[in-house]
Image (cartoon, rainbow, N blue to C red):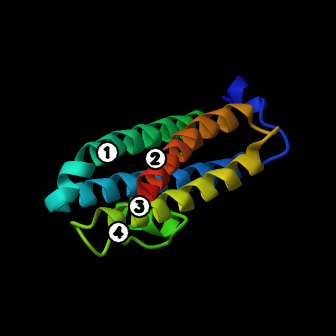
Amino acid sequence: MKRMGMTLIKGVDIDEIIGLLDRLYAYEMVATHYSLAVLNRLEGQASFVLEGAFEEKVMQNFDHARTIADRLGQLDGAITGDPTLLVELTPTKKFTLPRSNADVREILSHTLQQAQAGIQAYGDALALVKDKDEVTYHLLLNIMRDHIDSEDEIVVALIA
C-alpha cells in the first residue's frame, strides 16, 4: 500500500532518492568508523586535545545514519547491508586515516577534507530533492548544518 507521504514526492523518481539516501547513509557509517579509528589511535597531546571532539563525532555521525535509515524505510528503501560496499558508496570512494596519530594539525586537516567531501555530497543531494521531496530536503539540510558546524570548528582550530 502506498503511503500518503510518498505521494508528496513530485518530479523525481523515488528510487533515485533511495539511492541518494543510501550513499549518504554509507558516508555517515564510514564517517562513524573513521572517527572511531582516529579516536582509537590518538597519541600524545592529540589525545588530550581531540578525544572529546571525536567521541562526539562518533555519536553524531551514527545518529545521522539512523535518521537517514529511517527515511529510507519510509520510502520503502533499505540501507546497504554489506559493510564491504559502504566505502565504495561514499563520495570519497576510499578510506584513509591521517598520516600521524599525534599531530593535531595533520589529524584536523585530514578530517577537514573528509568533512568537506560530505558537505559537497549533501549539497548535491539537496539540489536534487529541493522542491520535489520536502521531507527529505529538510532532513538532509539539518544534517548538513551539523557538518558545516563541524567544518567551521575545524577551520577555527586550524587557524588558531
Instruction: First in sequence, mark 4 or 2: give its number.
Output: 4
Image quadrant containing the C terminus:
bottom left
Which residue type carries mark 1? Ala
Q: Residues within 10 Å of mark 4 (few under 14, many from 20)?
A: some
Q: Name the residue at the right extreme.
A: 11
The image shows residue 13 at horizontal and vertical percentages of 76, 49
Label 4 residue SS = helix
Label 1 residue SS = helix
Q: Which label was assigned to residue 135?
A: none
Q: Nearer the viewer, residue 79 or 38?
A: 38
Q: Which label was assigned to residue 53?
A: 1
Write the residue at 70% across / 26% down. 5
Mark 3 vs mark 2, foreground winner is 2
Instruction: First in sequence, mark 3 or 2: give its number.
Output: 3
Instruction: First in sequence, mark 4 or 1: give its number.
Output: 1
Q: Report if the CB atoms under discs 2 and 1 are less than 8 Å apart.
A: yes
Q: Nearer the viewer, residue 82 or 54?
A: 54
Gap in angstroms between the C-alphas marked 2 and 1: 10 Å
Q: Name the residue at the top extreme.
A: 4
Q: Residues within 10 Å of mark 2 (few under 14, many from 20)?
A: some
Which residue type carries mark 2? Glu
The image shows residue 37 at horizontal and vertical percentages of 25, 60
| Residue at which label 2 appears | 153
Is residue 59 found left or right of 132 in the rendered image? left
Instruction: First in sequence, mark 3 or 4: give its number.
Output: 4
| Residue at which label 3 appears | 111
The picture quadrant where one finds residue 140 is top right
The image shows residue 109 at horizontal and vertical percentages of 42, 65
The picture quadrant where one finds residue 63 is top left
Label 3 residue SS = helix
135 is higher (above) or lower (below) than 64 = above
Label 2 residue SS = helix
